[in-house]
Image: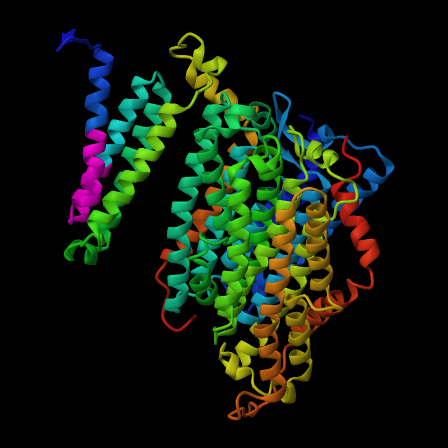
Amino acid sequence: MQILGFYITGYQVAFVILAGITLASAAMVVLLPNILRAAMFLGLSLFCTAGLYALMNAPFMAAVQVMIYVGAITTMIILAIFLSNRVMRIGFAQAIYNPLLAAGAAGLMFLFLFLTVVNSVWVKSAVAAGPARVGQDVPAVAQALLQPYVFPFELASVILLAVLVGAVVIAKEDVDGDS
Amino acid sequence: MQIGNLIFILPALCMSVAAIIVLLLGVVASKRPHKGLDYFFPAQYAAPVFTAIVTGIAGWLAWTELAAIKAGAFTEQAVGLFVVNGHAQLTVDPFAAILSFIAFAGTLVVMFLSQDHFGEDMLHKAEYYSLLMFASVAASLAAAASDLIAIYLCIEFLSLTSYILAAFSKTDRRSAEAGLKYFLYGAACSAVMLYGMSILFGITGGNTALSAIAIGFKGELANSAAGWVAIMFVLVGLGFKLALVPFHFWAPDTYEGAPTPVTAFLSVVSKAAGLAVIVRFLTVVANPASPASSMWYWMLIVLTAVTMFYGNMVAIWQTNIKRMLAYSSIAQVGYLMIGVLTAMSSQVVPVDSFSAALRNNNKGAWDLPGVLIYMFAYLLMNLGAFAVVVVVGKRLKSEAIDSYSGLMKCAPFLASALAVFLISLAGIPPTAGFLGKLFIFGGAIMTGMDRHPELIVLAALGIINSVISAYYYLNVVRVMYFGFSGEGEAPAEPVRGTFAMNTVIAVMLFLTLAMIIFARPVSDMASSAVYSGLK
């Protein structure tokens, strides 16, 4: 397809739409005063990120992103908001004391990182440069997790155990008088 | 990978199992408080028993590794675990083994402190002790981590458990504030670190092992903007763990608000882990050719100097002893960083692994042995000081320096022990702190005379800072011995620690004073841990 003299592929159109929604909803998360709506937009932003993964030929990552981030984490956040009804009632003033300064600092940081990314040479690894292996990435991930990367995999499970215990201790309502 | 290699992480494995056992014991014991299992083997006794065994194993492991090195039968491959394409994810070299021993020993002392601080009727005690044990596992693995994924997971494991421990006193608002502040800063810093790691992963062609990255990360790449950003971002995360200025903002409030034993843990064990990672990262990856050509070397030199001055200058004005120790521990990290930077500057050719970096180094260099010695001395004197603060704080219900006035009269043992620990922190002979500083500053000056004059400046600033720190450390000693500005009333009742606490303090006191007598074997051990062997 040709628009204004530029040749544009469907891939690029999809990328621009997904990236646009991701950024716009991420901005809404920061700017909206109502925390429930902010959480909803967070879900949308994460969902579009999953779309970006799918575009980058990583369907497994996309599926994981939808299941864990959109499915589990966003639901948990919304559930937590519903359960703590005090948060529901008060308007959540977002604490940006100096929006101009904040925007300026964030903009400078963006410019800096953007120029860095554009100006560097990215070495393509053999895996990334090879032919797309559709349908093979799940076995590959599974094998990587249980063979070379078994240490991080096992360590992550210990971390999850410790953090779950900690979360219960912090969140539990203690009976008065026995602390 | 051979199963036999797992023996190198045996202490961490045993500790994880023990932590789960303590957790289960807690579930069983909570059914009948003060009876049955809770009476005979409660968590506050089970945890130190297990930790003592694990500390023993870790000490034995470090000892046998040193012995094997002396015999000359040691290769880096032998101590590498979970090897992918020839690059190990964990490298339990003697440096890691000794730091992991320090982490477990520190945790053991922190447990004794916790027993005294929280008492028997602590709420969720099984959970508290098992989290402490998990945190020590993270610290010991971080000491050996030589792969970006392993480093990130270990640092994050340590951080997550530390956030919970800092917020553990739920009835105390300051504790909640401590945990929350630590968590918010920690989350931001670890996100930045992860971003830096992803850039490092990208520009070196998809490598996560430090030694593999070191091969790709040379020449132009290391001096490119992306390389610079990657290194700086990773250093943000590590700087946060070490509370280096300007990533220290969480430290004073967290240290003051957290339960005192947790503060002791954060200021010693957590820093030992961060130090191990930063040493490995700086000497292997972030050291492309000559350090003087890399921007972050100069940046770290400036940050080290600022860290020392900031920590000491602010510590002078503190009236709360925990807050004073918090700021002073920021300065202490500055001294340790001098040793790390000296080790970094000793490199003249790019290296692919930590042991290669050590082989290039001057065999008689004092820098990394100095870091090990100072870390051990810091463990003794800082935990010792915190032990006295726990005992006195519990009896007097106060952490103000004023309340220490006249402590000499009512608690001569505690007061003299605290005096020795503070003198050691100031680096005055004949204490362990002096030995550590001698090695670190001496090493910096020796390397500085050779080719890096900026290190001499850094050592001179370190000595100036030691003098500044002596002012506020000795001020506490003055208050204890001569009372505070006329108003000094000795506490009505004598302050006494329990038998266990007095024993712990006495052992630390003995080691703080004895280290200088055994200076020769200690320094021999530290330098053979760092330099000899590994082929």
- Look at the picture and state if B383 lies above or below A161: below
Question: What residue do we see at 42% from left, 45% from top?
Answer: B189
**Toward the viewer: B435 or B378?**
B435
Quarter holding residue B460: bottom right
Question: What residue do we see at 84% from left, 34% from top?
Answer: B72
**Toward the viewer: B104 or B231?**
B231
x and y, in percent, of residue B318 in the image: 48, 73
- Give the colouring mode of the picture: rainbow
Position of B423 with respect to A9 (left or right) is right
- Look at the picture and state if B467 lies above or below B307: below
Q: Is residue B181 in view?
A: yes
Magenta: main secondary structure equals: helix
- Look at the picture and state if B423 lies above or below B480: above
Question: What residue do we see at 71% from left, 47% from top?
Answer: B449
Check if residue B504 falls in the magenta segment. Answer: no
Position of B357 with respect to A85 (left or right) is right
Check if residue A30 falls in the magenta segment. Answer: yes
x and y, in percent, of residue A96 in the image: 22, 52
* Quadrant, the N terminus of chain A: top left
- Look at the picture and state if B268 lies above or below B369: below
Question: What residue do we see at 22% from left, 24% from top?
Answer: A18
* Quadrant, the C terminus of chain A: bottom left
Total labels: the figure holds 0
Q: Is residue B50 in view?
A: no
Image: magenta residue range: A21-42
x and y, in percent, of residue B4 in the image: 72, 31
**Toward the viewer: B369 or B513?**
B369
Most distant residue in the left direction:
A4
